[in-house]
Image: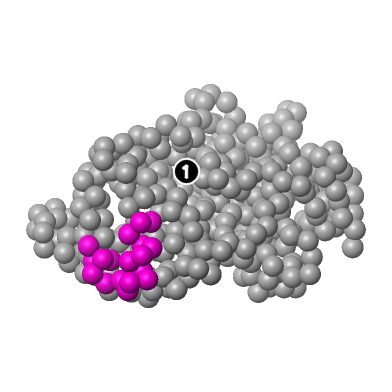
């Protein structure tokens, strides 16, 4: 089966999508798997003890948030522990640190004081120290503490992350009008708007990048800042997927080059719209693509994806582990990474080899 080299791919419009070829076996996956598994196995017990300690020390929490709030606190603590375990398993403390920064931003936008999260984490750390084995104590506190410096300034993490977030959409233009229709639940009007723009000469690539990608960034920003509900976020994303499906006659309109690409999202990666759009750009450039969707099991050898998507730090190492299982006798696949991953140290561009 032939390969397509770097120079040939660079002539393709599809190659302008940010890709990388990144192949390694992360030593931490073996060295720290025991500690991470210990933490995961004890997570429910640790979360219960940490929440009980927090509510005993601060009885006003129950009066303020009720039993429902206590249940949510337990759920959140389980999430904290899950990200902590992933950070240990993959040898990347930044997973836990970045997650905590995101949590602060989300909670502050919803009226919670950063002090409340700080005290909850303090109780969680105490229970960890009392619960873990000596091997766990040699690893976990260091990773845990690496995520906490931003809490020295209440709200500072949220402010810092807000400065790095995507800027709001311009108040005029096609993308803003499209998003306004979706936020009002007017899916057909949004489709009509896009179709009118195409008939007026707007290119399909511009629709994908400026309208669909731009509106999705804005939807995420609006949800994170508590401007829209999770139901609205899900509706807008689903509506965009439906509208994209109505436009595939334009995607498939160019000449075909008899090249094939299989794409997939990493195990545990549920954000698949971006990978679908990447596959569409290859289609626009004449490729035949097969997108396998979200949360692709690594054991699906018959599919043999050549391009994996990872939008979160916890997904990227899983993609790395999945690749040799899915393609044991072929060259390493490329990976699509998001800006947060690249800022966390994942390389963004490498030599490209595709099986076609």
Q: Say if residue 295 shows up in the picture.
A: no
Q: Estimate the x, y position of residue 105 in percent, counting from the top left.
A: 35, 42
Alpha-carbon neighbours of circle 1 within 10 Å: few (<14), some, or many (≥20)? some
Report the magenta stretch's main SS.
helix
- Going 74% across and 60% down the picture, which residue do you hit? 332
Residue 80 lies, with reference to residue 107, above or below; the image says: below
Q: Estimate the x, y position of residue 260 in percent, counting from the top left.
A: 83, 57
Please check the rendered image and state whether residue 152 is part of the magenta-colored stretch, yes or no.
no
- Going 20% across and 52% down the picture, which residue do you hit? 119
Which sits in the foreground, 118 or 250? 118
- Going 55% across and 45% down the picture, which residue do you hit? 345
- For the image, the number of numbered tags is 1
* Screen quadrant of the C terminus: bottom right
Q: Which residues are magenta?
A: 126-143
Q: Say if residue 349 shows up in the picture.
A: yes
Residue behind mark 1: 220
- Going 49% across and 37% down the picture, which residue do you hit? 218
Q: Estimate the x, y position of residue 96 in percent, counting from the top left.
A: 40, 54
Describe the element under mark 1 as helix, strand or loop: helix
Residue 347 lies, with reference to residue 52, above or below; the image says: above
Determine the image quadrant of residue 348.
top right
Which sits in the foreground, 282 or 30? 30
Determine the image quadrant of residue 306.
bottom right
Residue 19 is left or right of residue 91, and the answer is right
Residue 21 is left or right of residue 112, and the answer is right
Q: Estimate the x, y position of residue 335 in percent, counting from the top left.
A: 67, 53
Which sits in the foreground, 50 or 272? 50
């Amino acid at each position: 089966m032939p390969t397509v080299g770097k120079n040939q791919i660079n002539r393709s419009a599809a190659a302008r999508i940010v890709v990388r070829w990144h192949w390694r076996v992360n030593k931490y996956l073996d060295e720290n798997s025991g500690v991470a598994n210990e933490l995961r196995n004890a997570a429910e017990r640790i979360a219960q003890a940490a929440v009980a300690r927090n509510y005993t020390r601060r009885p006003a929490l129950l009066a303020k948030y009720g039993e429902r709030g206590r249940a949510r606190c337990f759920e959140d603590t389980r999430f904290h522990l899950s990200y902590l375990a992933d950070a240990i398993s993959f040898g990347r403390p930044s997973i836990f640190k970045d997650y905590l920064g995101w949590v602060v931003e989300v909670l502050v936008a919803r009226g919670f004081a950063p002090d409340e999260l700080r005290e909850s984490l303090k109780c969680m750390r105490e229970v960890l120290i009392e619960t873990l084995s000596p091997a766990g104590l040699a690893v976990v506190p260091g990773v845990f503490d690496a995520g906490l410096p931003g809490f020295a300034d209440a709200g500072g993490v949220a402010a810092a992350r807000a400065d790095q977030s995507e800027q709001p959409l311009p108040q005029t233009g096609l993308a803003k009008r499209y998003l306004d229709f979706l936020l009002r639940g007017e899916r057909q009007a949004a489709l009509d708007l896009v179709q009118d723009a195409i008939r007026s000469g707007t290119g399909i690539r511009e629709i994908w990048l400026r309208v669909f990608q731009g509106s999705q960034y804005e939807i995420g920003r609006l949800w994170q800042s508590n401007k829209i509900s999770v139901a609205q976020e899900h509706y807008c994303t689903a509506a965009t997927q439906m509208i994209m499906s109505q436009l595939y006659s334009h995607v498939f309109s160019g000449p075909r080059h008899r090249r094939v690409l299989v794409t997939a999202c990493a195990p545990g990666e549920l954000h698949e719209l971006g990978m679908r759009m990447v596959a569409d750009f290859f289609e626009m450039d004449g490729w035949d693509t097969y997108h396998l969707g979200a949360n692709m099991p690594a054991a699906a050898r018959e599919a043999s994806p050549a391009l994996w998507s990872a939008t979160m730090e916890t997904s990227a190492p899983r993609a790395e582990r999945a690749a040799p299982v899915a393609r044991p006798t072929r060259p390493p696949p490329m990976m699509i990474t998001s800006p947060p991953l690249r800022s966390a140290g994942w390389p963004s561009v490498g030599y490209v080899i595709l099986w076609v």
